[in-house]
Image (tube, coloured by chain):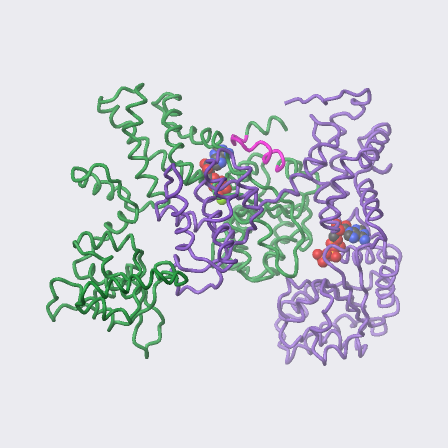
Chain colours: A green, B purple
Amino acid sequence: MGVLDSSFDILCRNGEVKQLVSLLGQPEESIPQCIFISGHKSSGKSYTIHKVLDGLKVHYASVNCVEGYLPRLIFESILSQIKGEILPPTSKCDDVMEFLTSLKVMADEMNLHDKVVVIVLEGSEKLRDMSPNLLPALMQLQELSCLKKVCVVLVSDVLWDKYIPPGGLPPPIQIFFQQYSQSDILKILALDKPKDYPADFYSNYLQLFVAVFLRSCRDITELRYKAAENFSKYCEPILRGEIDMNDSGRLWKHISPHLKTSLQLIYMRFETEKLSSDMDLMKPMDKHSTLSSAAKFALSFELPYYAKYLIIAAFLASYNSPKEDKKLFVKLSGRTKKKVQKSTKNTQTKISSLVVGPRQFDLERLLAIFYSIIEEKPHISVNLLTQITSLVELQLLLKVGNDPLETPKYKCAVGFDFIVIIAKTLSFNVTKYLVDYK
Amino acid sequence: MSRTPKKPKTTTNVIKPNEVLSIRKIVKSQILDPASNPFRGSPKEFSDVLYLFRRAIENGESNSALLIGPRGSGKSTLVETAIKSLQDDCEAFDDSVIVRLNGYVHTDDRLALKGIATQLQLENAVGDKVFGSFAENLTFLLQCLSQGDREHSKSVIFILNEFDLFCHHQNQTLLYNLFDVAQSAQAPICVLGITCRKDVTDLLEKRVMSRFSNRQIHLYPQAFETLEEGVRNRIQLCINLLSLSSKDKINISAATVAHWNAEVESLCHNPTVTDCLKQMYYTSNCERTLRNFLLLVISRLDDNKLELCPSDFSEVSKQLHRNLRVAMAEGLSVLELCLLIAMMHQNEIFDFAPFNFEMVFNRLLKFEQHSSKTMNVDRQVVFKGFEHLKALEFIKPVSSSSQVLKEFQMFNLMLVTDEIREAVNNYQGLPTEVSQWAFSDYT
Ligand SMILES: Nc1ncnc2c1ncn2[C@@H]1O[C@H](COP(=O)(O)OP(=O)(O)OP(=O)(O)O)[C@@H](O)[C@H]1O
Ligand SMILES: Nc1ncnc2c1ncn2[C@@H]1O[C@H](COP(=O)(O)OP(=O)(O)O)[C@@H](O)[C@H]1O
Ligand SMILES: [Mg+2]
Ligand SMILES: [Mg+2]
C-alpha cells in the first residue's frame, strides 16, 4: 500500500488518504455502506477522493447535488457514469425505486455484484432539501440494492450533526478534513509556481502574499487565484528592469499596496481589471488612500445623475422615519435639527435604524425626498419611473411585495458606505439628512 | 514506510504479512456483512416473529403484526435471520413468496403495487390490464398466485420496512387493503411492519386500525442492571467481532488463529481499550457506532502493521469523539473567528436575542477601534466571512424570508461559548488581543 500512497500526488493529506484506502482499497473485503467526508471549502475533499478512487481503479460515479436539482438528474448521472456511456433517452429514472431497478440490471449486465462501486455525492447537504426519502435511501443503498460492495460517499462543507432528521439515520463512517495549516497552504500554493522562476523566489513571494491574505481567507481555491493574479504584478518591475530580482525589500514595498487592494476584492471576481485601471487614473489625486471595496463597487455602476439622487433619496427614506421628513427636508433652523439628534442620543435603548435595517417606503415619499434634495430639478418630461425600474434591476433598490392592487413599496438595498461614495461624486452631504448618524 | 513495532516481542512474527490481509478481510466481514451477523438475544421476540411466519407458510394462516424498536436495535437483522432459518428447515418455504417493501423506496401506493408485482414475478400477468380500484389490482395479484393448484395457494409474507412512512400514503390504501386481506383471510398473507416509531398505531386511520390484528412486538437494545454490566457486554461483543473462529482458517495457520484470538482477548481487557469502549457506551448504546469504531480500528492493519495495539483503539476513539464543530471553527480565518467572538458577546449582552450582520459588524468595529494592530475590517470582506459562517450553518436564519436584505436578516448562533473559546485556545498563531477579547466579559 505504501506504493499507492505516493502515487496519488496529494499533499498534506496522508492520514485521510490512508483511511480511505484502508476502507475502499481491497476489492475482496467488505465495504461500508456510507462514508461521510466533511471539512472546510477547498480543503481538498473532492480532490482527494477523486485521486484516491482513480488510483484504486474502482468503478465510481461522482455527482454534484446542485441546489434545486431533481433526483432524476442525480440518478441518471450516477447510472450513466457507472455504465460509462450516456443512457438511452428511453431509460427514465424518476424515483428511488426505478433507480434501484436500473442499478440492479446494470450490475447483472456488467457483473458488478462483487466489485467495489463508489458513488460520490458532492454538496450532499442539498440532498436534505430534496424529497425526504432520498438521503436515507442513498445512505442505505447497500441494504436496499443488494449490491454488496456499493458505497455512497457523502461530501459536504456542513457537519454531520446538521444532517440528522427527526427520524434518525444510521451513523456513517466519518472522515473529517482538518483545515490546512499555514505551512500546508504554502506547500500547495507552491505547486502553481510558473516554470521560469526559481523556487525560492516564488516561495519568498508566497510568504509575503500569505502574510497579507491568511487572516481574512483560508480558502485554497481563492488563495490560488489571488496568488497568481498578484504574482504578475510582483514581477512587473523586474521585467521592466526597475527592481533587481534579489531586492526583496523593494519588491515588498512595491507589492504591498497591491496585495491590500486585492484582498479587499476577495471572492469578488467581477471587473477586477476594470476597477484597477480606474484606480490608476485616480492615483495622482490621492496617492495614499486605498479605496474600500464598497467604494469600488459603488463606482463600478456609473449611475446617471438622476439615478444617483434617487438612490440617495431611497436610502434616506429607508433609514429616516417619515415623521422626521418634514423637519429634515422643509428648511428648518439648525437648532431644532440638533434637538432631534440629541434626543435620539439620549435614549440609549433605541437601536439605530442603521443597525436594524431599512424600512419600506412608497413612491410618493421617495419622489418627495428626491425633489427636496436634488440641485437641478429635472424637467417634467424626464421619466423617473424608468430610472427606478433600472435601479431595481441592478438590485440597488428592492421592490417589496407583488400585489398589483397595492401601490408598490420599496427598500434601499445598498449600505451607508455605498451611499457616501455616490454622494461624494455629487458633493452632497448625506449625513446632514440622517437622523441616526452619530 | 516499513514501521517496526515499538517493543519487538518474541511473538511478533507469528502473523505473516499475507495472513494479516486474510484476517482483515474476515474481521471486516464479521463487522459489516449482515450474512455473518445472525440475530442474537431477545429469544421471545425472535420466536414470536418466527412463529408468525411459520404459521403463514406451513398452515396458510393470515396474520399481521408490527415489530417496533429504536434504530439499530436489530429489527431488520431479526427478520432476515428468521427468514433464513425458515429457508433452512421448512419444506413449505419454497412455495411461499416474500415481498419486501421499504418506505424510503415505495413512496406511494402506485410504486408499492409495482414493487409487489415485480417481486411476485407477475409483471407480465398484469401487462396492460386496467383495474377499477387499488383493491381489485391487489386481489388480482394475489389470485394469480393461487391459480393452478386451488387447494394450495402460495403464502405471501409482506415485510414493510419503515412502516410509519406507509401511513402517510394517500388514504392508507395499501395498508387498508393488506390488512383487509389478512383479516378476512381472502388469501394466505402475513403482513409484518417494521418501524422505529413507538406511536405508530396513532398514525393509522380508524378503518385501517380496525383491520390490524394489533399484535405488537417490541424490541429494545439489551438492558443491563448496571452500567458496568453493559460495558462488560460491550467488551464481549467486541471480542466476538474481532476474533477468528476455527472455521475461518483458510490461508491462516492454526497457530496464527490462536495467537490472534489471544491477542484480541488481552487487548479488549487492556485498560486503555476498555476506557474507549466505556466512553463510547456512555454516549451511545447503538451497536452501529461500535461497529463503525471497530471497522476503523481493524482497517489500520496492513502488511506493514501486523498487529493491533491499544493506541489504535485510543486514536480512533479520539477521532470519533472529537467535537467537529470546534475543529471546524479552528479552520476559520482569524477574521471569521473574530466574527464568532463578536456574536458570542452579542449573545451575552442581549441575552441570546437574534442578531443581524450590522449588529455583529458594529461589535467587531468596536473591538477593532480598541485594538492596537489594525485588522482588515473592510465591510465586504467581513460580509463574505459572515456568509461563510452561514454556509457552514454555524449561524441559522430565524426565518427564511427573502424579503429582508441580507445584512438585516436575523440569525441565531449555533455554537456555544465554550466551543468558541476552545477553538480560540487551540488556534495556531492567533493574535493575543483576539484571544483576550474572547475571554473578556463583554465588548
Ligand atoms: N440483537 C442483535 N443481534 C445481532 N446483531 C444485532 C443485534 N442488534 C443489533 N445488531 C447489529 O446492529 C446493526 C443494526 O441492526 P439492524 O440493521 O438490524 O437494525 P434496525 O433495527 O433494522 O435499524 P433501522 O431501524 O435503522 O432499520 C447490524 O449491524 C446488526 O448486525
Ligand atoms: N492536498 C492537496 N494537494 C494538492 N492540491 C490540493 C490539495 N488540496 C486542495 N488542492 C487544490 O485545491 C483545489 C480545491 O480543492 P477541492 O478538492 O475542490 O476542495 P473541496 O472539495 O474540499 O471544496 C483542488 O482543485 C486542488 O487543486
Ligand atoms: Mg468539493
Ligand atoms: Mg432496518
- Which residue is drawn at the image coordinates 37% and 58% (left, top)? A355
Q: Is residue A237 above or below residue A425?
A: above
- Give percent across and percent down for residue A240: 22, 24
- Give percent across and percent down for residue A87: 51, 53
Q: Is residue B355 above or below residue B24?
A: below
Residue A371, can we see it? no
Q: Nearer the viewer, residue B245 or A72?
A: B245
Residue B302, can we see it? yes
Q: Which span of residues is magenta-colored?
A: A8-20
Q: Quadrant of residue B59?
A: bottom right
Question: On the picture, is B265 further left or further right than A299?
Answer: right
Magenta run includes residue A15: yes
- Give percent across and percent down for residue A155: 55, 46
- Which residue is drawn at the image coordinates 81% and 42% (left, top)? B235
Question: On the picture, is A189 further left or further right than B265?
Answer: left
Question: On the picture, is A250 further left or further right than B173?
Answer: left
